[in-house]
Amino acid sequence: MATPFFTWIAICMAGLVHPFFISMTEINHNAANKSLEVSVRIFTDDFEKALEKSCRCKIDLLKPADKTLADKTVSNYITSHLQITADGKPASLQFAGYQQEQGSIWSYFEAKNVGTAKRIEVTNNLLYDYKTEQINMVHVLANGKEKTDKLDYPERVLEFGF
């Protein structure tokens, strides 16, 4: 699913010090499995600070003292700031885990029982509670077509038609 644009974003996100605040959400409609496969990439340091602000707790995503608690904190934060509907039906995101890669955290979700995806609506306000400079990129692949757009604070909703 890598495109030149997302390759550029990945290179930018690889830096440990970054002058901008960005997340990348990728949504893939898997027609064969009737599911949405969702991955969210956020700079590790920004994500930890946003999580700490949200849960009012200390969190280390790279070496968590309690991995189960870290998983729950990541899942709760993202699902409260990212909602997806497919053809007017809310997609229930189930957390599959997270991993660290090049200075950022990839979080993975799956929404089952999504038979069609002619219209995808994404509500995304990830890290808006942390930085008003936040930009949330969204890339969707459905029905053999790819579409990308972005949300600048305070924008929250994107719609994609396939």
Image (tube, helix red, strand yellow):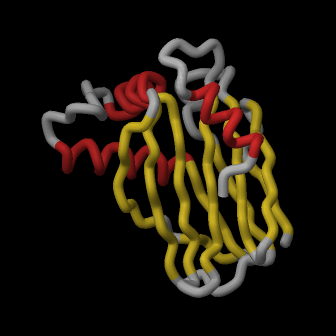
Image vertical order of residue 26 relative to residue 84, above or below: above
Give the residue drawn at x 59%, y 21%.
131
**Count the marks: how many?**
0
Give me the residue at 58% from left, 15% from top: 18
Residue found at x 21% / y 45%: 69
Left or right relative to 68: residue 33: right
Whether residue 29 sits left or right of residue 49 in the image: it is right
In-front residue for pair 105/51: 105
Instruction: Determine the image quadrant of residue 19.
Output: top right
Residue 11 placement (x, y as % from top left)? 62, 29
Q: Quadrant of residue 83?
A: bottom right
Percent coordinates x, y for residue 52 in the rendering: 35, 27
Which quadrant, please, contains the N terminus? bottom right
Measuring 70% from the left and 83% from the top, which residue is drawn there? 116
Residue 103 in picture, x, y percent from top left: 45, 27
Figure check: 4 above or below 62: below
